[in-house]
Amino acid sequence: MGGEVTQRDSILITYADQVRELGVSPLRTLAELCEKYLAGVVSGIHILPFYPWSSDDGFSVRDYRAVDPALGDWDDVARVGRRFRLMFDAVVNHISAQSEWFRAFLRDDPPYRDYFIVVEGAPDLSRDLSRVVRPRALPLLTKFTTPSGEKSVWTTFSDDQIDLNYRNPEVLLEIIDILLFYVSRGAEFVRLDAIAYLWKEIGTPCIHLPQTHHLIQLFRAVLDEVAPDVLLITETNVPHADNVFYFGDGYHEAQMVYNFALPPLTLHTFRAGNARVLSAWAASLTLPSARTTFFNFLASHDGIGLNPARGLLPQSDVDALGQQTLAHGGFVSYKHNPDGAQSPYELNINYFDALSNPDENEPVEMQVDRFIAAQAIMLSLVGVPGIYFHSLFGSRGWPEGVRQTGRNRTINRQKLDWTALESELADPASLRHQVFTRYAQLLKARASSPAFHPHGRQRVIECGEAVFAVLRLSPDGGERVLCLHNVSGDAWRAERAWENTFDSVPQGGNLTDLISGQRVHLPRGEGLYLRPYQVMWMVRG
């Protein structure tokens, strides 16, 4: 794999203005926060789109090469990059309707007339366009007036997000130049946003088309030649079998893909108090080469996608996740289907709240235990962890934000005050302090063992229905960690899971919990009891 990743790598996902400080540019405040709290906790920072934008919280970019002046400048980005590996977004499926490119198109400027996808005779193509897979319940085409007449323009995501025309070689060369510009500004990871929709072919679903894969292969070939240490990560919120297709043959497409099935499967696991579905899925995970690995996550700036769970969970369990989300104060978003119907595609809820109902009088200690157990499962699996800011810092949902913006995703996008955040982190009784302290402990434990290397191996261990157990092995097989996670609210006995996983650990022997550092005596002839939602990462000795 080009740029080396190890067990020490984990990436925080955050907005540039996630924390605000009076009189200080948000990117500078972000750098201060990272330097003060995250050194030795995470290795990288994914700064969500920090370019000038017009909608979708940054994902409708007006200028790919600029930093939004309201956030700071390139020197502020570079400061973050001095101590942390940087991930940038390449939002290259579409560009803002307020961008100079599209304004030039609206003026009929010759260089830009073919930058976007104009559909002629749109009303007569309704049948051919009906197969197009839609990620949102919005019109596919938007009408714009130009000097040469009214034109129907392709807008997959919204009327402010204009899809680029990759049939035009000038567009392709421009985007490649932008990717290289990001590399020159310090990006070690490039996230290809909404990449599955890149190529359009009327009469097809316009998702996962061969031409899209060819374009990714071209991006990879250019970066391998010019910047071989830079890694591509594809963001494709689709069923798992389609998602892993973006590894290509293991050498010529993405080095990492977002592991989109993990968030809904983990949520289902804790809802059911049963790890069997998650265990079976994890046991099936394979990688096409030692140059690829998963980008594992549970929460992000978006919601919890349901499409990746389809085919892995029965529809009744998918529906139950939606019902639980609504019961816990969240929202469910819908998309258009080719047959004209709508179906739920995303749960909009803070992940802590998804697991623990804010209205229940449940001890906060148990809620934290449950949340940390879920995060520990994510950290235990093969891959590089991506950790959303609100997960690491113990946030709850923000329904007031949804009322303000009218957008469901705002529930998990609250911006925080620097002084208030620091005050809560300094208070041992606060939820933020408890979650951050325990999460940081997990991340440091993970970084300490080569068994968690992203190119190591994993073996799911049968350990009872309420325990998710996975053995992690370093690439050379010399280091082993047995990860035990009780996904239920009851104590559970792990049935001698260490047998056949460690050499020379007889009954009555000892293991050490990598997280707490405590030695664990294995009872002779008995299993090891795990408290409700307890996590233990066991090493020999």
Image (tube, helix red, strand yellow):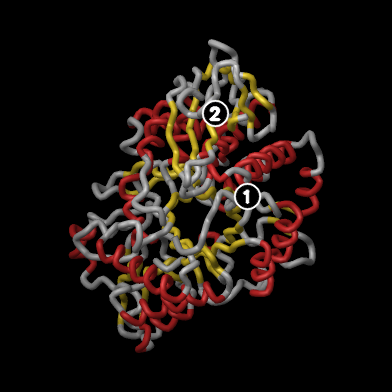
Task: Please determine whether, in this image, residue 289 is positioned above or below residue 277.
Answer: below
The type of residue carrying mark 2 is His
Measured as percent of width and height from the top left, residue 168 is found at 30, 79
Residue placed most toward the observer, 340 or 520? 520
Of the residues tagged 1 and 2, which is closer to the observer? 2
Residue position for label 2 = 485
At a point 35% along the width and 32% down the height, the residue shown is 313
In the rendered structure, find residue 492 and report the number of the disc placed on it.
none
In the rendered structure, find residue 389 and report the number of the disc placed on it.
1
In the rendered image, the residue lying farthest to the front is 504
Q: Would residue 476 appear left or right of 84 to someone viewing this image? A: left
Spatial separation of the CA atoms under disc 1 and disc 2: 23 Å
Q: Quadrant of residue 235?
A: bottom left
The type of residue carrying mark 1 is Phe
At a point 54% along the width and 50% down the height, the residue shown is 386
Task: Please determine whether, in this image, residue 400 is positioned above or below residue 65.
Answer: above
Mark 2 packing: few (<14 Cα in 10 Å), some, or many (20+)? many
At a point 31% along the width and 46% down the height, the residue shown is 241
Q: Work out whether residue 395 can be spotted.
A: no
Measured as percent of width and height from the top left, residue 66 is found at 57, 76
